[in-house]
Image (cartoon, rainbow, N blue to C red):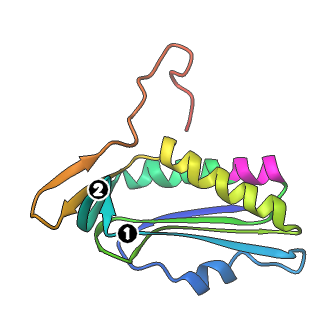
Amino acid sequence: MAAAHAAVTAEPIDAARLLGSVVSDDDGAALLFWGVVRNHNEGRPVSHLEYHAYAEMAERMMLRIGDEAIARFGVGDVRVVHRVGRLAIGEASVAIAVASPHRGEAYEASRYVIEELKKRVPVWKREGYVDGESEWVPGFTLAAETPETAGRPL
């Protein structure tokens, strides 16, 4: 039975372990999305990133997104890990592993998970620049509760 797994961690992400954890005998494809800290953004040289998260809520939302990907694309296991803390250039900030009988569905599911993660998961980042300045990068914004969504579980 396919399952989603999620974690927020301050520890480096182990790519081989993560990818190996999703593969089963039913799968013909396994993909790893590896999001890394780059040395620039919008024309400014970046020295590092700092990630902050509401970990419990982030893990619940990543699980929900993983479950949605499984249901929507018919893939096997989906695992999502997001780092928090100060990360250097080249370090992985997020990793998504997806296994599937076929590659097309694995690619679609992986893309879906990262796009939804960026929109819906309470993770914030602050960029540190080479000139010593830093600023919060626009991203997740906690949606206001409406009468239609009040009381619904994440």
**Against 101, is 19 above or below?**
below
Q: Is residue 114 visible?
A: yes
Residue farthest left in this picture: 132
Q: Image quarter for residue 132? A: bottom left
In the rendered image, residue 120, in percent from the top left (x then y), is placed at: 50, 42
* Residue hosting label 2: 43
Give, as a three-letter code, the residue at label 1: Val
Crowd class of label 1 (few under 14; some 14 to 19; many from 20; radius 10 Å): some
- The residue lying toward the viewer, choosing from 33 and 56, is 33
- What kind of residue is marked 2? Gly
User: How far from the left and from the top, in percent, is residue 116?
Assistant: 57, 46
Disc 2 + disc 1, Cβ < 8 Å: no
Quadrant (top left/top right/bottom left/bottom right) for the C terminus: top right
- Per the rendered image, the range of residues in magenta is 67-73
Q: Is residue 51 left or right of residue 61?
A: left
Dot 2: within a 10 Å radius of its alpha carbon, few (fewer than 14), some, or many (20 or more) residues?
Answer: few
Residue 103: image location, x then y, percent: 83, 67
Q: Between label 2 and label 1, give the one nearer the viewer.
A: 2
Quarter of the image containing the N terminus?
bottom right
Based on the picture, tell me whether residue 6 belongs to the magenta stretch: no
The residue located at (38%, 43%) in the rendering is: 139
Q: Position of residue 133 (x, y in %)?
A: 11, 57
- Give the labeled residue for mark 1: 37
Q: CA distance from mark 2 to mark 1?
A: 15 Å
- Residue depicted at x 81% and y 74%: 29
Q: Secondary structure at mark 1?
A: loop
Closer-to-camera residue (84/36): 36
Q: Is residue 93 left or right of residue 47?
A: right
